Structures are given as C-alpha cells and as structure tokens.
Amino acid sequence: MKRFAGKTAVVTGGNSGIGLATAKLFHDEGAKVAISGRDQKTLDEAVKTIGSDILAIKADVSKSADLDRMYNEIAAKFGKIDALFANAGIGKFAPVDQTSEELFDETFNVNAKGLFFTVQKALPYLNDNAGIVLNASIAGVKGELHTSVYSATKAAVRSFARTMAAELVTRGIRVNVVSPGPIVTPIFDRLGLPKEAVDEFARQIVAKVPMKRFGQPEEVGRAVLFLAGQEASYITGVDLMVDGGLTQV
Ligand code: NAD
C-alpha cells in the first residue's frame, strides 16, 4: 500500500526545486497533490512533470487573499488536507552594508510572514493528525557571508515550528522542520549576486560539507515525506538537517 494513498498533500512553491521534487514523491506515494507557485508557466510544466490529477494554483504566499483562494480551491477539489509542506521561499543575498530595506521586507514577507500565514490559514482545512513540515535552512543556525536577512527568516521558521507544534498537539497535528544544506535547485540563479560570486559561494560551502557534494531535491523530499506521514507519529517540533553532515559532523 502506498504511504499516502487516499491522502491530500499541499506543497507551496511546488513548481520548482525542492517543492517540485517533493510534490512528485507525494504523488508517487499515492497522494492527491496541490501545488502553488507564482509563475503560471512553471506551474503548467510542473503538472506535466508530476503526473495526473494535480491541482496547480497560482498564489503568492505573501498575500493573504491568495492563500484564502488557494485553500478554498483545494478544499473544493480534494476536501481536507493531511500533509502540508510550507516550502515556498526566496533567497536574496547581500553584505550587511549593502542590504536594502526592500530586500529585507521582501525576504521577510515571503519566508517568514508568508510561511506563518500559509500554516495559519490551513488550520480550518487540516485533518486532525495531519503532518506539517516547514522548510527552513541550515542558514538559520550558521553565519555564512551575505545571508544575514535570509538566515534570520529561517531562524524564525524554526521558531514558528516549536510554538505551532505546542499549540497543535491537541489536534494530533505534528509540526516539524527540514533544514536543507546546499541543494541543486534554481534558487542559486536567483540570489541577486553575480555568477562568479555564486560559484565562489557554492565552492566554499561544498568544501565544508563532509559528504563533499550538493544534495539533490529528492533527498530533502524523502525527509519531508517521512516527517509528514505516520512513520513520524511520535515526532513533533524537530529540525531535521538534510545537509550531508554540514551542521553536525
Ligand atoms: P526554487 O527557487 O527552485 O523554489 C522556490 C519555490 O518557491 C518556487 O517554486 C517559487 O515559485 C516559490 N515561491 C517563491 N516565492 C513565492 C511566493 N511569494 N509565493 C509562492 N511561491 C513562491 O528554490 P528551492 O531551493 O527549491 O527552495 C525551496 C525552499 O528551500 C526555500 O524555502 C529555500 O529557502 C529552501 N532552501 C533551499 C536550499 C538550497 O540549497 N536550494 C537550502 C536551504 C533551504
């Protein structure tokens, strides 16, 4: 029997990178899957990649009205939700002295505020015993160059999980975090840094990873499915690092 047969899974930012790989794994394990993202073209492509009966919704997690519409559409098509992967996020890097107020606001709006309301607005639609997984980052516990704002949003995500887990335990809903290390996704093309700086950042970070390689999006996705499903029935509030040993070894 497939692990998520008869279940509904929602993945924000399911049209790219880690979210897309995770949505595909949920689908392969029998779930009805809804994905969201901001770009219609990549949403359409993701539907083709993932397979049949996918609901793809254009919705910006930083806009409350979009989240309301998203959950209404999901409820109308699939009913209640069993697994939520709050994954959508952006990474824009800059040194502290060159960080604009705009970069600060945008990053917090998507990664912290957007994720918070992704969970809050899901609550009426979640089945009791649902699993919520929040995508943070090892950046939340590290001090890498040029990541001050991004890293702070991810520390906020980790903190949300603790309080949300405490509040939702009465409904049997578990809230856990995955913190990826460097993973091969298009996020590195969107950092807002020149290509040479991105290459240098990648070289430096991979040199610090005990496994000496980038991770693949599916390697994060498999951890998400574990935490979201009943195999993790006695686990809540944890932060599972999927980072080739970077933060632990
Ligand atoms: P990606 O750029 O491929 O995917 C990001 C996804 O988020 C896209 O689908 C995009 O449409 C969506 N998104 C961005 N802003 C949105 C918004 N306002 N509303 C709705 N959707 C939005 O990058 P990725 O690496 O797959 O990133 C996914 C998550 O993983 C992010 O939260 C990121 O911070 C986290 N992460 C990535 C890495 C890595 O090395 N790739 C490491 C640690 C954490």
Image (cartoon, helix red, strand yellow):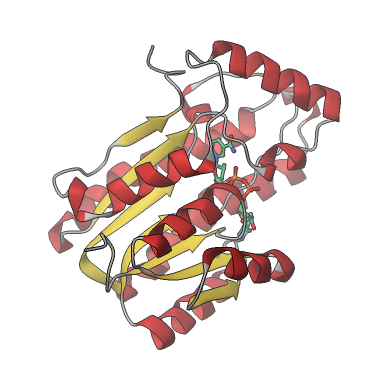
Residue at the image point whose x is 56% and y is 67% from the top? 36
Left or right of residue 220, residue 47 in this image: right
Screen quadrant of the C terminus: top left
Indicate whether 234 appears above or below 9.
Answer: above
* x and y, in percent, of residue 152 in the image: 54, 33
Residue at the image point whose x is 31% and y is 45% from the top? 176
Left or right of residue 184, residue 227 in this image: left
Indicate whether 190 appears above or below 212.
Answer: below
* x and y, in percent, of residue 20 in the image: 55, 56
Residue at the image point whose x is 16% and y is 63% from the top? 171
Total marks in image: 0
Q: Quadrant of residue 85?
A: bottom left
* x and y, in percent, of residue 110 in the image: 60, 53
Q: Is residue 87 visible?
A: no
The foreground one among 61 and 18 is 18
Indicate whether 101 appears above or below 140.
Answer: below
Residue at the image point whose x is 53% and y is 47% from the top? 18
Indicate whether 7 appears above or below 215.
Answer: below
The foreground one among 216 and 166 is 216
Left or right of residue 119, residue 193 in this image: right
The foreground one among 26 and 132 is 26
Q: Is residue 165 visible?
A: yes
Judged from this view, the residue extending furthest toward the front is 1
Screen quadrant of the N terminus: bottom left
* x and y, in percent, of residue 133 in the image: 36, 50
